[in-house]
Image (cartoon, rainbow, N blue to C red):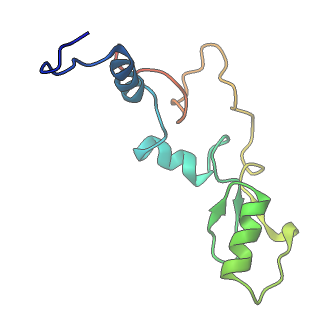
Amino acid sequence: MTGKAKPKKHTAKEIAAKVDAATTNRGGGKAGQADRTGLDKGGHAKFECPQCKITAPDIKSMQIHHDARHPKIPFDESKLVNLHASVAGDTSKPRPGDTSKPRPGVRGSFKK
């Protein structure tokens, strides 16, 4: 315990949170940009709007986008472009010895 006039030092919880934030890839920057585009399997954006080419992660989000941005055109689920279907092979789980690039959102440190 510290006295009234003494400032507290950094707690173990605060230091652990800083280490976690520094070593966990949250998907921002250039690594996250490829993930957000949906071009690679496992990306956030699964569907693409046929009118304006904007991407969305699921049907419900795309329907909300369509109702807001294209109210005069009827929503047709069959016209949506599935970006994940166009990618060949399943890379959702890395294989042993796989030297592919690291994917965003995967916990791990580059500081070794």
- Apparent side of residue 65 relative to residue 108 in the rendered image (left or right): right
Q: Position of residue 67 (x, y in %)?
A: 74, 78
| Quadrant location of the C terminus in the rendered image | top left
Q: Quadrant of residue 70?
A: bottom right
| Quadrant location of the N terminus in the rendered image | top left
Q: Position of residue 82 (x, y in %)?
A: 76, 57
Q: Quadrant of residue 53?
A: bottom right
Along the line of sight, the residue nearer the viewer: 16 or 81: 16
Residue drawn at point x = 74 percent, y = 86 percent: 71
Residue drawn at point x = 36 percent, y = 27 percent: 22
- Apparent side of residue 40 relative to residue 64 in the rendered image (left or right): left
Residue drawn at point x = 83 percent, y = 83 percent: 74
Q: Position of residue 3 (x, y in %)?
A: 17, 14
Q: Quadrant of residue 52?
A: bottom right
Residue drawn at point x = 54 percent, y = 34 percent: 105
Residue 9 drawn above or below residue 54: above
Check the image and name the residue furthest to the top: 1
Q: Position of residue 68 (x, y in %)?
A: 68, 79
Along the line of sight, the residue nearer the viewer: 16 or 47: 16
Check the image and name the residue furthest to the left: 5
Residue 88 drawn above or below residue 106: below
Residue 46 drawn above or below residue 28: below
Check the image and name the residue furthest to the bottom: 72
Along the line of sight, the residue nearer the viewer: 24 or 11: 11
